[in-house]
Image (cartoon, rainbow, N blue to C red):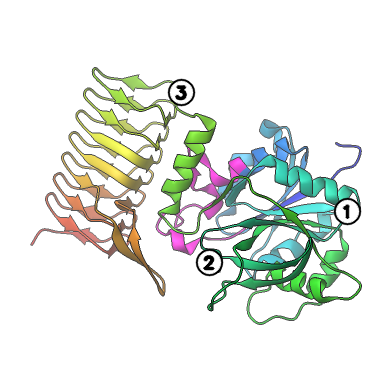
Amino acid sequence: MSDNPVTAVILAAGEGRRLEPLTNRRPKPMVPVANRPLLEHVVEAVAAAGIDRIALVVGYRQERIRNHFGDGDDWDVTIEYVEQSTQLGTGHAVLQAEPIVDGPFVVLNGDRIVDADVIAATRERVLDGTYPTMAVTTAERPREYGVVSLDGDSVVAIEEKPEGPVETNRINAGIYGFSPAVFDAIRQTHAPGELAITATLNDLAAADDQGVTAIPYDGRWLDVSNLWDLLTVNAALIGNEMGAEPDSPDLGNSVAVADDVAVAGNVRVASNVTIGGSTAIGSNATIEANAVVENAVIFPDAVIGAGAVVRDAVVAGNARIGPNATVAGEPATVVVGDAVHHSVELGGVVGDNAVIGGGATVTGGAVVGDDVRADAGVVIDGRVESGAIVRRG
């Protein structure tokens, strides 16, 4: 362990309902991008920042996280687990780590990818005795996040997803530095609904004897809020990490593979296949002859049938896209809960173990649930609930 150990508390208990059906079988932090779970990218950044002790706050489908990361040896860190059995907000999640945190610590989200240097900067601040701190970045659509008002390097207020106009594009980056004193502060926070850590930070920012210090950050900040964000984040990771070197693909004749493609081990690619840019193909996947796959996230064990076209799409584990099927719709309007999103670049999402029949068409923005069976030649649009059967006529 380090001479001055700082623990990283990573929040990974959430379900991620906006990513359904991909989160029906796995917690959101275990959804893969560039062929590795979101949370693995976070753990690697923490290790690169010089922190070798991690507390993972787990809850929903936590066995998937525990089985993947174990004790952390594969990442040269020590991982301990604490459970948030009911998801009652980020403040409540941080509180669950109290029994194993005995000094300054850094908090970050298990589903948001950032550079190691901002984690290291936060670590250095808390080692110097500067806390609480929070990283502040900028966003094109700040109203979708926590908008931060500053006075110099002091946080004045954080307003979560404001409805009215905003005067700044500065947002909460979701990386915090604390001392154990924050646990009492969280318990003293009175806020309606779920207990968010930002409610406590607002209380501390307003306190005469406290204050919250901002750490400016303009590096990589990759957030997955909705299904189509997986494509954006996947493309960014492949481009930055140059994950195009395939481990051990079985490539047929006349296969065209773009430079920015990540291919995992034991992938089988038949003849005359085209794999376009910004594509990740998971382990044991099969791409049959004459298929076209571009700007796509293909989970392990999926099968893309002969002559199929899959663009701007996510195909989950063990799903099968039939021969000559198409998942490559135009920009679409997608409804997620009560929110309507227009002009979304999402060809479609196909859930785990779903089967799309030969010659079928998945229209733009369609979301096909787990275990769906769709007949040959059907046209699928909108949302198809898990377990449904889609027949012609």
Q: Which residue is mark 3?
A: 245
| Image quadrant containing the C terminus | bottom left
Point out residue 115 in the picture as x, y percentages from the top left corner.
65, 42
* x then y, percent, for residue 255: 27, 22
Furthest-top residue in view? Answer: 253
- The N terminus is located in which quarter? top right
Mark 3, secondary structure of its residue: loop
Q: Are marks 1 and 3 in contact (CB under 8 Å)?
A: no
In the image, residue 348 above or below residue 45: below
Q: Residue 226 sits in which quadrant? A: bottom left
In the rendered image of this protein, does residue 254 appear above or below residue 71? above
Query: Amino acid type of disc 3?
Result: Glu
From the viewer's perspective, is the residue at label 1 or at label 3 nearer? 3
Residue drawn at x 68%, y 50% as measured from the top left: 217
Determine the secondary structure under disc 2. helix
| Cα distance in 3D space between marks 1 and 3 | 42 Å
Q: Which residues are magenta?
A: 12-41
Q: Is 18 on the left or on the right of 60, as rendered?
A: left
- In the rendered structure, which disc, 2 or 3, sits on the residue that comes first in sequence? 2
Picture disc at residue 102: 1
Give the amino acid type for the residue marked by disc 1 in the picture. Asp
- Select label 1 or label 2 by which is in front: 2
Q: Nearer the viewer, mark 2 or mark 3?
A: 2
Q: Is residue 55 at least partly visible in the picture?
A: yes
Query: Residue 213's image quarter?
Result: bottom right
15 within the magenta span: yes
Q: Badge 2 is on which residue?
A: 144
Figure check: 259 above or below 29: above
Left or right, residue 306 beside residue 349: left
Residue type at tag 2: Glu
Please name the residue shown 83% across and 54% down the image: 101
Coordinates of residue 277 in the picture (x, y in percent): 36, 34
